[in-house]
Amino acid sequence: MWHGDLAPITIGVVVLITLNAFEAIGSSTAMPVVARELGVLADYTWAFNAYTVASLFAMVVAGLWGDARGPRGPLIAGITCFFLGSVTSGAAGGLPLLIIGRGLQGMGGGAAIVAAYLLIARAYPESLRPKAFSVLSAAWIVPSIVGPFIAGWLADSMSWRYVFWIVPILIVPVAVLLIPRVGPYQGGEPHPKWRSRLLAGLVATIGLFLLQDGALRLSVVGYAEAALGVVVLLLAVRKVLPAGALVLRRGLPSSVMMRAFFAASYFSAEVFIPLALVQIRGLSTTMAGLTIAVSAVAWAGGSYLQSRLPATKDRSATVRLGAAIIALSIATVPLSLLGTWPAWIAGVSWIFASAGMGLAVPSISVQVLRLSPEQDQGVNSAAIQILDAVGFSVAVAVLGIGYATAVAHGGATAGTFTGLWLASSVIAVIAVVLAGRMRPRIPH
């Protein structure tokens, strides 16, 4: 991967993912300052929602485009949208322009990650794909550890706008390095159902918007809107997934669906760890954030271990092991809220959970590409990214309603957070049970 013609592609993809990671972590760190300065504290969550909603539609488009024309077009579009979105977000003087900028960033990030996956499928031999996905995981290490400090320093000492403006400066060399080298990796024929898939992607995006908007309203009408959003989202998203995915048909459909379970379990639990440590144990925001920031190293370590497995090996057992580790790790996080246990036990638990994600998530990607026909590698790469967003959004919305209800009835307690984490752990247990369906049925 680091020699010959593949070396510039590897470097370009790694830096691209690193910049995406820094944007995600940096914007999360700086957003409270952004909201306070712009006077949009009540609505600032839409700065995150706009990114997620826009990225979902961009993934659908990029997958179809990449299969038909190759990764070059989605890559150029992704980098361009990401550049424009970062500039726009940094220049925002109010919520409308900030939402536009974050939406453009979401479109860019969604298209770029699908293009990166498709490029791995087309440029790298199958034997190198596990290592390629391991390197993508490692690209998150530095942003996860130093990103909060850099973003915090820029926001406090200079301006939060530089958190967004630093990305366009660095992404230009990536474009110069990467784009000229992806031309040879062409696509094939347009997907026979590209129009219906494109429409389904648009409807799914609307469903995701309804879910997130409704969950924020904290009212009966809002909850009804959120429920409608879930229904619309699930009905639409099945059109952009392999046939049989939602009913967990063996082989490729179940392999794709596993990403939803892992995103729902891990990220829904992670959302509440800093909050619980601050509210229940009295940790500073920085210390609570560092509790989960260092776990990126464990994720990369787990990903390195899976990269040692043969690329042609069935990955269901590895995915099951990762899910079991995550389920157990999340179930032990509530110990950090007991006065008889140190608060840093949450960090230990999260190191193991992240190692489980490192084992499982790249293994799912390897399995999906191994089972995908070449003409469907783009749409299936998009499908696993879409399910990341859907799994995370649905789980966080549901658990968020539970948290908001507790706050409205006297405040969240240690028992509240324990219940939320145990719900996340149960999702991982379901993944343990279903992982075996990733193995295709062997004909007699």
Image (cartoon, rainbow, N blue to C red):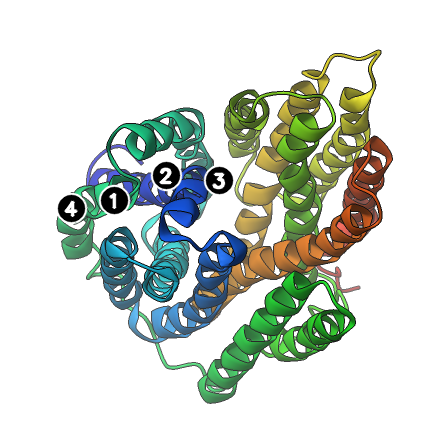
- What amino acid is at disc 2? Phe
| Residue at (51, 60) in percent of width and height | 49
Q: What element carries label 2?
A: helix
Q: Residue 22 carries which label?
A: 2
Identify whether 57 is placed above or below 346. Answer: below
Q: Earlier in the sequence, mark 1 or mark 4?
A: 1
Which one is nearer the viewer's eye here, 181 or 108? Answer: 108
Q: Earlier in the sequence, mark 1 or mark 2?
A: 2
Residue 153: x and y, percent?
A: 32, 27
- What amino acid is at disc 3? Pro
Residue 142: x and y, percent?
A: 38, 27
| Residue at (39, 38) in percent of width and height | 26
What's the distance in space between the residues labelled 1 and 4, CA to CA? 16 Å
Q: Are marks 1 and 2 in contact (CB under 8 Å)?
A: yes
Q: Are marks 1 and 4 in contact (CB under 8 Å)?
A: no
Which one is nearer the viewer's eye here, 229 or 215? Answer: 215
Q: Which mark is residue 167?
A: 1
Residue 416: x and y, percent?
A: 83, 40
Identify whether 187 is placed above or below 98. Answer: below
What's the distance in space between the residues labelled 3 and 1, CA to CA? 28 Å
Question: Label 3, on which residue?
Answer: 130
Q: Quadrant of the N terminus?
A: top left
Which one is nearer the viewer's eye here, 213 or 118? Answer: 213
Identify whether 136 is placed above or below 329. Answer: below
Which one is nearer the viewer's eye here, 135 or 216? Answer: 216
The residue carrying pointer 2 sits among few (fewer than 14), some (14 to 19) or many (20 or more) residues within 10 Å by Cα, namely many
Instruction: Determine the image quadrant of residue 279.
Output: top right
Question: Label 4, on which residue?
Answer: 177
